[in-house]
């Protein structure tokens, strides 16, 4: 096993590209939309004290997910130009 030496100038790190960031936003957005399907089960139930709260969580989740998906497409497209 090799020894890891300290490199004061930093490693040979590659910056994260907008294409990779866009792909990450797309994946997170899709996961949030899948989670919104779970929230959808609770939104329809008659919860007297928390019905509006659950609807707010559902709409917030869907809104953020759609925003991330659109932002991901924009970032992926911008990298190719």
Image (cartoon, rainbow, N blue to C red):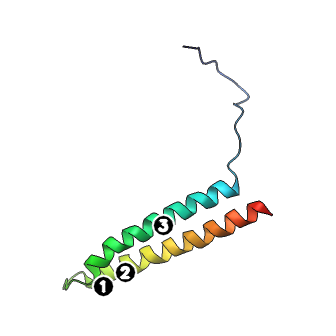
Q: Which of disc 2 and disc 3 is earlier in sequence?
A: 3
Per the image, the residue denoted by label 1 is: 52
State the image coordinates of residue 28 (x, y, percent, origin top left): 50, 62
Q: Which of disc 3 and disc 1 is earlier in sequence?
A: 3
Q: Residues within 10 Å of mark 3 (few under 14, many from 20)?
A: some
State the image coordinates of residue 31 (x, y, percent, origin top left): 44, 64
Q: Quadrant of residue 4?
A: top right
Q: Quadrant of residue 5?
A: top right
- Report helix, strand or loop for mark 2: helix
Q: Are marks 2 and 1 in contact (CB under 8 Å)?
A: yes
Q: Residue at x 42, y 73 (%)?
A: 61
Q: Residue at x 69, y 57 (%)?
A: 18
Q: Quadrant of residue 19?
A: bottom right
Per the image, the residue denoted by label 2 is: 56
Furthest residue to the right? 81
Quadrant where the N terminus sits is: top right
The answer for how far apart the CA atoms under marks 2 and 1 are is 6 Å
């Amino acid at each position: 096993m090799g020894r890891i030496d300290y490199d004061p100038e930093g490693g040979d790190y590659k910056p994260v590209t907008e294409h990779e960031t866009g792909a990450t936003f797309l994946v997170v957005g899709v996961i949030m939309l899948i989670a919104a399907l779970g929230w959808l089960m609770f939104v329809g139930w008659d919860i007297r004290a928390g019905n509006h709260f659950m609807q707010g969580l559902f709409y917030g989740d869907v809104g953020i997910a759609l925003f991330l998906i659109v932002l991901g497409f924009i970032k992926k497209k911008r990298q190719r130009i």
